[in-house]
């Protein structure tokens, strides 16, 4: 099986294989893969519509720990755009800086008021209905409106019996007089489709929604779509082909071959027709036509359509006021054919509706969720809202941008391409025995790249992404047990929280099979406590900066605790590099050695910062010289800034070569906090250092000098610019900051001053 080439494809492949398995549990909601995919498809179409019909390039995601956040992440990828996560809890000024630096086209959010001040268009998805779907916007005028009004969920067998008498079809060319009410709900297949759907475990079509609403002029329709399965409906449709006389009100279970089109589509690898959106439009002058571009090529459709005698074809006379709804075809929407997103190559059911206004004009007034047949790669060739199209993306397009702390005082954008993240998933997705029934934690905020691991390692394997509330993260043991988690991934500091609560009792987490930690060093003592509490869990450490796509090394602890390593600083080794990568330790003499700055190259290494000015000094050529101007080349090394040594054949992290630190998993450039302090009135100079807190975890302390510096005022000013995790625990005012012989601020002397 070929590996997916885009991030969305990893999800789409699993959604096709395990549609009825749970994909997401969050905030009281539970969505299967099919439901999550349908919501992502719908939201993707809405994004295109919100962007004026042109697929957006970069979309900010201002949401967290909600269905909107996770379906929105997928929707942005599906539309062919780049995801730029934004944290609703960060100060508006900081978020505005990210929005400007990323040049966002649109923001997807569940809090539109909070996003209104950010200066770009905002889209807030409609709230979900009780069955998990957002309400459709299909509607019409006061004359005769035909639209969707909720799907009937009755099972196929009973509905098939009820449908047995509905076998009359409207043939092409038949005249229909004003006032005639017609509803074509069914086909050979379920809902409005025929064909096999890979999302059904039985291989039969998957029911979908197709309904008709009736307005004041007395046009009749049904409230609830028929869900009979294909075999029974095929029998009921055997008599299709009879013409309907003017004035007759009838429900027609359309026939095999019904639809606006039939034929093949060059975009489908099988050469068969690609399902898409098409609806019958009834104009004021009585002419009917298709509203929604058919994606199959013309010549083949012309031939294939010649025998389709059950569709209302373009040009059929339909008088004003006639209510017509063509929901049923052989195939998806208004088409016949196969869908390459289905492993079987058969068509996937979806929705297609027609609205008829007061003057008899019909058109599609809601974005339909037709699958595009391009393998879920995030765009290309298929209709979205208003007849637009998703952007087709490839491995070299940017999947997401994470903004990390920047030493200049502004966050740095790290673009990660589909090529990078897909290579990462190839390295790690199979490491943790994930499949249907696996329940994986989602602990990281979406602005932290560990969240990408959370989402797509779960979805690549068919597991359930289980999202705890933020408050639950402070009680990891209780949360793991209450949620029945089998896989846990977090920063090691959460072990400290659990230990302080006294909940890390031996055997207290029996459901865990895998425990993975990353984002900051894991002490061997914390690892021993966790292992005792989860004796049935394998334990692993992942290490890597955002620039090399989440992680570049891994260390798995031996099953036998007696075989665990000893390290000079008491932290777990970071292990060895992922097989696809090359790692090198650059010594102080500028040559490779056993101790030095870790440098990385390979398919996980990013292609340079969003602002090329940030590339300076971060890359080395093949002969280990500083790279010049211009984008880094494929064989260039990325300098991580981490000091690493080799001990017993394993890499051990020793610290930073610069002044970057990690606090509770968050990567922080001390210079960014210092720059924020220096920007305040009266502050002459500032320095930020880390000191051990009472619980042994590092915390930030700041020292400032200058006339009139007031700590409370400085705290207030910092709170408007920095997220909570970057706030110093204390700000001390000194007459002057101590300097070393070179005239630079002496950090060691500052630590002494601060006690």
Image (spheres, rainbow, N blue to C red):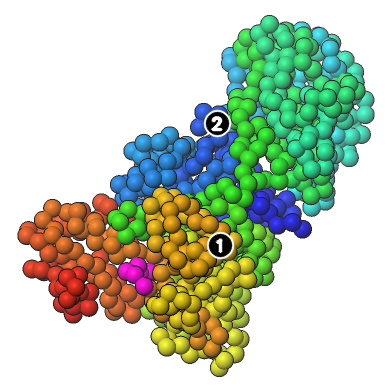
Identified at 17% across, 54% down, the residue is 680
Q: Is residue 508 visible?
A: no
* Range of magenta residues: 657-663
For the residue carrying disc 1, how many other residues have a C-alpha within 10 Å: few (<14), some (14-19), or many (20+)? some
- The residue wearing badge 1 is 635
Choose between 104 and 671: the one closer to the eye: 671
Q: Quadrant of the C terminus?
A: bottom left
Figure check: 560 above or below 346 = below
Identified at 71% across, 46% down, the residue is 375
Real-space Cα separation, disc 1 to disc 2, in angstroms: 36 Å
- The residue wearing badge 2 is 54
Q: Is residue 237 visible?
A: yes
Choose between 37 and 101: the one closer to the eye: 101
Mark identifier at residue 18: none
Report x, y in % for residue 377: 65, 46
For the residue carrying disc 2, how many other residues have a C-alpha within 10 Å: few (<14), some (14-19), or many (20+)? some
Q: Secondary structure at mark 2?
A: loop
Identified at 62% across, 15% down, the residue is 357
Report x, y in % for residue 378: 62, 44
Identified at 81% across, 44% down, the residue is 345
Which residue in the rendered view is the most extreme toward the bottom? Answer: 562
Figure check: 1 above or below 238 = below
Q: Secondary structure at mark 1?
A: loop
Figure check: 480 above or below 505 = above
Side of 480 relative to 212 (left or right): left
Report x, y in % for residue 116: 36, 37
Q: Quadrant of the N terminus?
A: bottom right
Mark toward the start of the polypeptide (1 vs 2): 2
């Amino acid at each position: 099986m070929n590996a997916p080439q885009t991030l969305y494809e990893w999800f789409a492949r699993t959604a096709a294989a395990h549609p009825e398995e749970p994909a997401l549990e969050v905030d009281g909601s539970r969505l299967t893969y099919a439901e999550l995919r349908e919501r992502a498809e719908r939201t993707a179409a809405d994004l295109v519509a919100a962007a004026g019909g042109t697929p957006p390039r970069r979309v900010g995601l201002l949401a967290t720990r909600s269905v909107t956040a996770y379906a929105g992440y997928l929707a942005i990828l599906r539309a062919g755009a780049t995801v730029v996560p934004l944290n609703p809890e960060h100060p508006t000024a900081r978020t505005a800086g990210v929005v400007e630096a990323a040049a966002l086209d649109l923001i997807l959010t569940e809090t539109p008021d909070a996003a209104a001040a950010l200066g770009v268009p905002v889209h807030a998805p409609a709230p979900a209905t009780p069955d998990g779907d957002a309400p459709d916007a299909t509607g019409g005028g006061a004359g005769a409106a035909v639209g969707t009004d909720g799907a009937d969920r009755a099972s196929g067998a009973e509905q098939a019996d009820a449908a047995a008498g509905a076998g009359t079809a409207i043939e092409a060319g038949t005249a229909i007089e004003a006032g005639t009410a017609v509803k074509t709900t069914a086909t050979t297949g379920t809902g409005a489709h025929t064909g096999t759907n890979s999302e059904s475990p039985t291989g039969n079509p998957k029911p979908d929604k197709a309904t008709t609403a009736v307005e004041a002029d007395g046009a009749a329709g049904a409230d609830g779509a028929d869900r009979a399965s294909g075999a029974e409906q095929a029998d009921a449709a055997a008599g299709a082909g009879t013409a309907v006389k003017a004035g007759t009100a009838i429900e027609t279970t359309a026939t095999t071959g019904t639809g606006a089109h039939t034929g093949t589509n060059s975009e489908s690898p099988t050469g068969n027709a690609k399902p898409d959106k098409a609806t019958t439009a009834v104009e004021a002058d009585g002419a009917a036509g298709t509203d929604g571009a058919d994606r199959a090529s013309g010549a083949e459709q012309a031939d294939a359509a010649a025998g389709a005698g059950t569709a209302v074809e373009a040009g059929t006379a339909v008088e004003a006021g006639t209510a017509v709804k063509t929901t049923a075809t052989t195939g998806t929407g208004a088409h016949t054919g196969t869908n390459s997103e289905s492993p079987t190559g058969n068509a996937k059911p979806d929705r297609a509706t027609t609205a008829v206004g007061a003057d008899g004009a019909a058109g599609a007034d809601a974005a339909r969720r037709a699958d595009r047949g391009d393998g879920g790669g995030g765009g290309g060739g298929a209709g979205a809202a208003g007849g637009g199209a998703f952007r087709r993306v490839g491995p070299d397009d940017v999947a997401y941008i994470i903004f990390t702390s920047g030493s200049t005082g502004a966050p740095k954008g790290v673009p990660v391409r589909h090529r990078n993240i897909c290579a990462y998933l190839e390295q790690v997705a199979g490491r943790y025995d994930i499949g249907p029934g696996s329940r994986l934690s989602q602990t990281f905020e979406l602005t932290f790249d560990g969240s990408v691991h959370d989402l797509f390692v779960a979805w690549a394997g068919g597991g359930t992404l289980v999202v705890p509330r933020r408050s639950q993260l402070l009680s990891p043991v209780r949360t793991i047990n209450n949620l029945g988690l089998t896989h846990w991934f977090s920063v090691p500091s959460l072990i400290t929280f659990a230990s302080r609560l006294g909940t890390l009792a031996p055997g207290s987490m029996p459901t865990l099979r895998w425990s993975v930690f990353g984002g900051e060093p894991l002490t061997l003592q914390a690892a021993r406590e966790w292992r005792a509490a989860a004796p049935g869990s394998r334990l692993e450490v992942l290490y890597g900066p955002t620039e090399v796509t989440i992680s570049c090394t891994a260390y798995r602890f031996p099953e036998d605790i007696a075989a665990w390593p000893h390290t000079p600083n008491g932290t777990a080794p970071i292990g060895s590099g992922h097989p696809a990568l090359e790692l090198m330790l650059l010594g102080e003499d500028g040559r490779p050695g056993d101790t030095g700055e870790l440098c990385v190259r390979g398919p996980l290494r990013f292609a340079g910062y969003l602002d090329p000015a940030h590339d300076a000094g971060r890359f080395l050529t093949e002969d280990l010289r500083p790279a010049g101007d211009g984008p880094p080349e494929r064989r260039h090394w990325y300098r991580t800034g981490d000091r690493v040594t080799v001990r017993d054949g394993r890499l051990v992290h020793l610290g930073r070569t610069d002044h970057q630190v990690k606090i509770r998993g968050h990567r922080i450039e001390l210079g960014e906090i210092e720059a924020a302090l220096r920007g305040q009135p009266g502050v002459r100079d500032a320095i930020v250092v880390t000191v051990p807190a009472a619980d042994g975890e590092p915390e930030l302390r700041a020292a400032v000098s200058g006339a009139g510096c007031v700590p409370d005022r400085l705290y207030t000013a910092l709170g408007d610019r920095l997220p909570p995790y970057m706030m110093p625990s204390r700000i001390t005012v000194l007459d002057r900051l101590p300097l070393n012989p070179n005239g630079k601020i002496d950090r060691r002397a500052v630590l002494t001053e601060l006690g």
